[in-house]
Amino acid sequence: MQLEKKIIEQHNDGLISGHQKKFDYSAGSVANINNVLAKLAAFQIAIPSWALGTGGTRFGRFSGGGEPRSLEDKMEDIGLLHALNRSSGAISLHIPWDIPKDVQAIKALAAQYDLKFDAVNSNTFQDQPGQQHSYKFGSLQHVDKAVRQQAIDHNIEVIRHGEALGSDSLTVWLADGSCFPGQLNFRKAFQNTLDSLQQIYKALPANWKMFVEYKAFEPNFYSITVGDWGQSLLYATKLGPQAYTLVDLGHHLPNANIEQIVSLLLMEGKLGGFHFNDSKYGDDDLTTGSIKPYQLFLIFNELVDGMDAKGMDHATGLGWMIDASHNVKDPLEDLLQSVEAIMIAYAQALTVDREALNKAQANNDVVACQEILQEAFRTDVRPLVAEARLRAGGALAPVALFRELKVREQLINERGQKTVATGL
Ligand code: PSV
Ligand code: MN
Ligand code: MN
C-alpha cells in the first residue's frame, strides 16, 4: 500500500488549528526558527531492513502479522514510514538477508518511495547455508587464514551489492572475540582483524566510507575484538581516511559517558555515524528515547556543537541510522516513535543557547551551564518537529494516522497473518 497525499492532507486539516496554536507559542521563543525548521526537514534517519519484523528474544519470537516477506515488502514498509514522517528516507540493508534479485527493479522501487540506500551491512556473525567455513570461532580474526579469506570475500561482495544500488558506505560489525580467558591471543586476534579489514578497505570505492562498529560484549562474553571506541578508533586510524568509528548506543558498558565519546571522536574527524536505540542494561535495542531521553539530548548537544565547529552539514556529515527491534510493539509504530525521539533530541540541541553556554563554561558557572542545557531539554519542541514534518508533506500525528488508517490490518490482508522476514 502507498499513502496518498490527499489522505495525509485530510488528517492534517483536522489537526491544524490545535497545532498552529502550539507552534506559534513554541516558535516565539526560538531564534532563527526558519533555519531550525529547514535543518529538521533535511534530517533523514535510515531504517534498518531488519527492524521491520518483530524482534526475537533468546527465548522466543512472537510474530505480529503482516510482516515483510521480502526486500520489496521491507521497502514498502519504509516507504509508509517516510510518507508519514518525511524523515525516514533511507534504508540500510543487511547482506545476505537482503540481496536484491533485480537491482534495477529495486532501484525503481526506491525512487518510487523516495528512499536512498544507506550503509550496507555485512554478516559474518552467522553461518549461512552452504557456507564452506564456520564462523563459530570468529571471522576476520580467525586463526585459520581460509576462514578470514571467506569473511573478507563476503565483505567485498557486500560492497559490490551496495555499489550497484548507490550506497556509499559499509558497516562492519564483528561478533569476533572469545568466551573464556586463554581462548584467544589478543594481539594475534587484533592483527588478524586489522589485516582482514585492510583487505576490505582496499576494495572500497574512492567515495565510500567504512564504519567500524564496536560492541562491549555479546555473543562473546569474555572479550570482543572490536570491543570499545578505543579499539575501533585504533582500527579506523590504522586503516586510513575512509575508515570511521560507528557508535551504537546500546554497545557500551553501563553508565558509559557516550556524549563524551561522541564529542572526542568528532573532534578527531573519526566519528562516522550512529545506530540509535535505547537500553536499560545492555544491547537491549529498545525504542530510541524510551529509557534515557536526556542522554539522547546530551549526545545531540555534542553533535550540533562539534559539527558546527567543523562546519559540517548536519544531515549529510554523518551516517544516521536506527538499530532497534523488539518483541512487544508493532515494529512500524515503534520506528515512528524512534524517529520522533531522535528529531526531538535534535531540535532541543538546535535550540540550546550556545553563546550563553560558552560564557557560563568560561566562568565556571556550573549552575548556569545546567540551567541552559535543561532549559532546552525541558522546552516542548514537539510543535517544531511537527511543523517541519507538515511543511515537508508529512502527517501532524504519524502514529495516530497509522492507527486511524488501520495500516497493520491492511498489511495483514495483503501479506497474511504468519509472515517471516529474512533476518534475525
Ligand atoms: C549487533 O548487536 C548489531 O548492533 C550490529 O549493528 C548488527 O549489524 C545489528 O546489530 C544486527 O544484528
Ligand atoms: Mn548496531
Ligand atoms: Mn547491537
Image: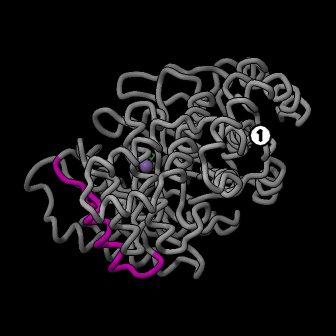
Q: Residue at x 36, y 67 (%)?
A: 265
**Residue at (24, 59) in percent of width and height:** 364
161 and 396: which is toward the camera: 396
Instruction: Name the side, left or right, on which 393 lies relative to 19.
Output: right
Counting from the top left corner in percent of width and height, residue 283 is at 34, 40
Q: Is residue 384 inside the magenta stretch?
A: no
Residue 126 visible in this rendered orientation of the protein: no
Give the vertical position of 222 relative to 22 (above or below): below
Residue shown at the point (56%, 60%) measured from the top left: 119
Determine if residue 182 is in view.
yes
Identify the magenta region.
222-242
Q: Is residue 224 magenta?
A: yes
Q: Secondary structure at mark 1?
A: helix
Determine the residue located farthest toward the right in the rendered image. Answer: 6
Q: Give the vertical position of 244 relative to 106 (above or below).
A: below
Q: Within 8 Å: ligand 2 and the Cβ of disc 1?
A: no
Image quarter of the N terminus: top right
Pinpoint residue 379: horizontal percent, then vertical percent: 51, 37
Looking at the picture, does residue 57 appear above or below residue 168? above
Front residue (pair 322, 201): 322
What amino acid does circle 1 point to?
A: Leu
Seen from the viewer's position, the closer of residues 338 and 353 is 353
Residue position marked by numbered label 1 in the rendering = 390
